Image: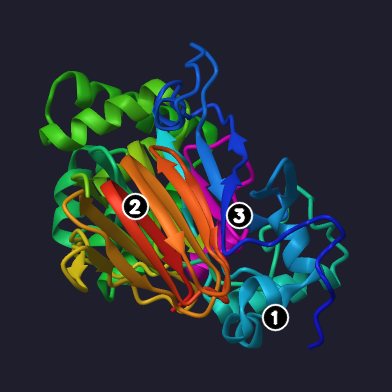
Amino acid sequence: MKTTEPRKGFVVDKLAILKNPLKPYAWGSDSAIPELLGIPVIPGHPVAEMWIGAHRLGSSELRQGNAWVSLLQLIFEQPERYLGQRVFSRYGGELPFLMKVLAASRPLSIQAHPDRHQAISGFQSENARGMAVDDPRRTYKDPNPKPECVCALTPFWAMCGFRSIDAVLANVEPFSALLHEEWNALVHAADEASGLRMLFRTLLELDPHRKEMVLTALRQQVESRALPASISEWIGKLLMAYPSDIGCLAPLFLNVICLEPGQALFLPPNTLHAYLEGTAIEIMANSDNVVRGGLTPKHIDIETLASIVNFSPSRVSPLQAQALDTFESIYPAPAAEFRLSRIDLDGATSVDLSCTGGIEIFLCTRGSLAARTESAGASNLVIGKGTSFLVMPDCSAIRLKGSGRLFRAVVP
């Protein structure tokens, strides 16, 4: 594809500082992201997410001199120039990933994301029914899957995947009298996945009277400390945040995990999950497809959720970074759209970082560094905590010097 000339007066450097949109969702932290960015903390004004990328609902802006221009617009105008030929040939005129800083002070919704086949089929089906893309009842906003990876900056709590059937039976046993038929069906299910699917769907479809009875019994179990401590603690917090939501039972059947700073969690499509508390770097395929199952006032699509979720029990373990060299470690998430790595510098010496030939995005989470490239003209940046920057595809290498930590997002 032939690219156009850069817009008049807009000089493209090899390295460019980014300005990123902030999302003030109610579940966000007042302080975590402002403190990262060095901006005032305003009590009662949560900042839940910072988006770093080129998304239609919030794009980073590229600074060149005194001008700021949307990265989404620049990619639209000159996709091969900003994405690089390798990325452009695979993904057309779209940056395939979105990087975020996520800061949760209260739990997010229970949700799952479709795989590629489900996303294409669902997107086409809703289009054929004439549903507007911004219709709140719509599930499929685009034809893309949404694998994602979250890397903890602070202790970060999440629910992810289903516990073993024996663990679920033990946790749900106190409610067996209220859920007699469902309990028997779970005990006698042909296999674990079908039993868990039945239980989950039944809970979502409880009539209002039975739902209130179950939630009342749940509160009593928490108050009497009859449940395991970690489960009881999170159910208590969920009941405080969503007192009438049946999703408060989720810790009984979903794995609860705490990531320590530096640990990550990969969430493939079809995985039921919810982020609970903490601050993290999140990277995902550039998709809006979210199927919700609880802990939310938003639309819940029970049929779709039951059809896409993988109900097979799974063990959840943190994803540990693997050393690529003495200063860069990669999180081995099996996603085609993104690769996340962490760069740690101690200030003792400068390091040369080879570029990938595609667009790259960096975020500094601590320290102070300098970045320089001399390929076809020098570019220089001074980088502090909270600074993010873009590396153009025609940059062959970067020299980094200083002491700090960077997260790096590329297309593998």
Name above or below for residue 89 compared with residue 257. below
Sequence-first disc among 2 and 3: 3
Question: What is the CA distance from the residue labelled 2 to the residue labelled 1?
Answer: 28 Å
Q: Residues within 10 Å of mark 3 (few under 14, many from 20)?
A: some
Tell whether position 301 is magenta: yes
Quadrant assignment for the N terminus: bottom right
Res. 92 mark: 1
Left or right, 3 with reference to 51: right
Determine which residue is flagged by label 3: 301
- Residue stretch rendered in magenta on the structure: 285-308
Quadrant assignment for the C terminus: bottom left
Left or right, 194 with reference to 91: left
Query: For the point 51% across and 39% down, which residue is it?
Result: 49
Q: Nearer the viewer, mark 2 or mark 3?
A: 2
Q: How is the image coloured?
A: rainbow
Sequence-first disc among 1 and 3: 1
Name above or below for residue 70 compared with residue 374. above
Residue 338: x, y in percent? 45, 70
Name above or below for residue 233 compared with residue 367. above
Q: Residues within 10 Å of mark 1 (few under 14, many from 20)?
A: some
Query: For the point 35% across and 42% down, which residue is it?
Result: 365
In the orientation shown, which residue stands out farthest toward the top?
43
Determine which residue is flagged by label 2: 406
Res. 206 mark: none
Under tag 1, what secondary structure?
A: loop
Judge by depth and name the residue closer to the eye, 325 or 147: 325
Judge by depth and name the residue closer to the eye, 127 or 214: 127
Left or right, 329 with reference to 108: left
